[in-house]
Image (cartoon, helix red, strand yellow):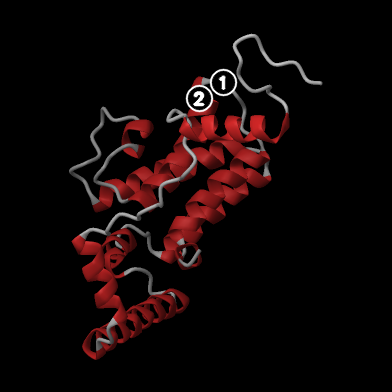
Amino acid sequence: MTAKPPDGSAPPGGADGFAEAHRALLADRSIQFELQQYQPSEPPGWLRWLLEFLATDHPAMRGSLWAIGIALALIILFLIARRLAGSGWPWRRGESAEEESWRPAEAPARALLGEADALAADGRFAEAAHLLLFRSIEDIDSRRPEIVRPALTSRDIAALPSIPPRPRGAFARIAMAVERSLFARRALGEGDWRECRAAYEEFAFAEGWRA
């Protein structure tokens, strides 16, 4: 025989107790038993218009896109062909022509290198480099007498903005080697001489312009 609770309520065990507990659980409003259905938000108007526009066939636009794609491909092929032909970029033509005007005549340049090579063959590398530097200054002065002033050092001349980049770079490489021998009291070796010779040769002869 099962004893009843003192307050006279039904015992917690058994089917009646389970049903009562279930009813009490369902009656508890603090517990949520049903989940709300997800309602996706409406896309903005501009997005709906774009999706509808893309979903619709537009022959005129399709033709325009094909025309733009073909034009871009032709431009790329044209630039590649120009590059392979060695003609360079169109906006560099003026710059190359100006630099070409600074290139010394080939015969005097080769004669100068012959004199310098003779000095270098005797181990007089500093004198050979000095010869290239001094003759280069004379050449610059003959072409642009207004920019070479007596007070200018070789380093000053190498920094003159009126000299185009290629001849200025070649001159600067020679000037740096000569300055090392004069001011740093460092004897120039064969490697230094070869560097000076290469700098002058790259600028003075046509082969250097195709590099």
Q: Amino acid at mark 1?
A: Arg
Q: Residue furthest top?
A: 6
Asked if residue 156 is positioned above or below residue 69 in the image, the reply reads above
> Label 1 near label 2: C-beta < 8 Å?
yes
SS under mark 1 = loop
Q: Residue furthest front?
A: 1
Front-most of residues 160 and 88: 88
SS under mark 2 = helix
Horizontal and vertical percent position of residue 117: 60, 50
Front-most of residues 161 and 35: 35
Residue that numbered label 2 is attached to: 182
Residue that numbered label 1 is attached to: 185
Q: Residue at x 25, y 90 (%)?
A: 59
Q: Residue at x 26, y 31 (%)?
A: 150
Asked if residue 167 is positioned above or below residue 1 in the image, the reply reads below
Q: Residue at x 21, y 41 (%)?
A: 147
Q: Residue at x 25, y 63 (%)?
A: 47
Horizontal and vertical percent position of residue 113: 53, 54
Q: Residue furthest right?
A: 1
Front-most of residues 48 and 42: 42
Front-most of residues 68 and 41: 41
Around disc 2, counting alpha carbons within 10 Å, would you say few (fewer than 14), some (14 to 19), or many (20 or more)? some
- Report whether 42 appears left or right of 35: left
Around disc 1, counting alpha carbons within 10 Å, would you say few (fewer than 14), some (14 to 19), or many (20 or more)? few
Horizontal and vertical percent position of residue 36: 41, 47
Horizontal and vertical percent position of residue 176: 48, 34
Q: CA distance from mark 2 to mark 1?
A: 6 Å
Q: Quadrant of the N terminus?
A: top right
Q: Amino acid at mark 2?
A: Leu
